Amino acid sequence: MTDVELVWPGLEPPYETLFRWLEGEGEAPESNNPVSFRPVMLAHAIEEVDFEKLDPSDFAAEWKWDGIRIQAASGLDKSGNRVTRLYSRTGEEITRSFPDLLPAFKQDGVIDGELLILREGRVQSFNVLQQRLNRKTISSKLLEEFPAHIRAYDLLAEGEEDLRDLPLTRRRERLERYVKSLNDNRIDLSPMVGFDNWDTLTQARSDPRSHGAGDDADAVEGVMLKRRDAIYQPGRPRGPWWKWKRDPKVIDAVLMYAQRGHGKRSSFYSDYTFGVWSNSEEGERLVPVGKAYFGFTDEELKEIDRFVRRNTVNKFGPVREITHEPHKGLVFEVAFEGLARSARHKSGVAMRFPRINRLRWDKEPRDADRIAVLEAMLES
């Protein structure tokens, strides 16, 4: 399977030579891509009960950065010219969007890392990184104001050698030497987190600034746990890698609008816009602060759907406005990873990765949070 994954991305349909090779009727096809994408390895979210089964001495830990997972592959083509390509975690090539990173690669290798924006030596928030994502035109001003950076996690190949079957500790040693040899400030190593027991790691996760992350602490999402003897396996095998995100921020918000979902949820109102209270000349009013469509169970979805249908006060095409008065409405406990200023939202703020954490049938809308709570979070 490894040989196939390295060959087929550089082939074109209908893949006749590939199928003949797989059936044993021909030689392996020659890919026209000298730097193929390697399917990425992913982690499972760790639960409290998992720690009881794990020995801390078996694991290494590193910060989980709030950026975009990226794979950078560099090699020589048949003419001896250097080719460097950047891939997203799904294998989509994104090289054209980040031309400023290409000169950093002067040696053959494949890095697994995090795409970030680095200004004056400090990692910027995900909201800053978004200014570089999905851009059709990459101007010199954009490159100057939003300089791209790769923080390296792993080394999957070096030269013609595939390193994925080596244990993590060996790959890390090779990665350190490789990054050092590149000698470029656009690529650095993701630092390891020192710990000898779970209590120490818990403290580091809750306070990255005091445990090695320094000024970059605000860009830390949590920690990654990786078995020291783990090979690099495509997919999401359970056991070798765990992700332990920092506790999300939580507020109470009021359901304001709802839309039907997609696929299996097309018959349910499962996409929800929610808001918090804000002062205005007319008194307190709700202003939207986010939209979420997951975090609830199937049974809770049915409950919310019934509420939406029974409490619709207006319709705007596919959107239903739901009653949201101080004494009548539905309160959500909403969890989210971060906040940013936003001129597109009436509230002036936007949430990152919001999700419905709980249904608060026990609360009236008047008990939901005020915009001042979110403003205080932004300030802090």
Image: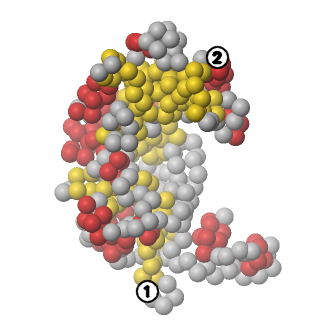
Considering only vertical position in the picture, is 98 above or below 281?
below
Residue 310, labelled with which disc? Answer: 2
Residue beneath disc 1:
81
Q: Name the disc covering residue 154, or none.
A: none
136 or 81: nearer the viewer: 136
339 or 325: nearer the viewer: 325
Residue 259 falls in which quadrant of the image? top right
Front tag of 1 and 2: 2
Asked which colour scheme the image uses, the reply is secondary structure
Q: Residue furthest front?
A: 282
- Asked where in the image residue 352 lies, by quadrant, the reply is top left
Residue drawn at (54%, 62%) of the image: 92
Tell me the CA gap for discs 1 and 2. 66 Å
Q: Position of residue 200 (x, y in %)?
A: 30, 32
* Residue type at numbered disc 1: Asn
Residue 186 vs 374, above or below: the answer is: below
| SS under mark 1 | loop
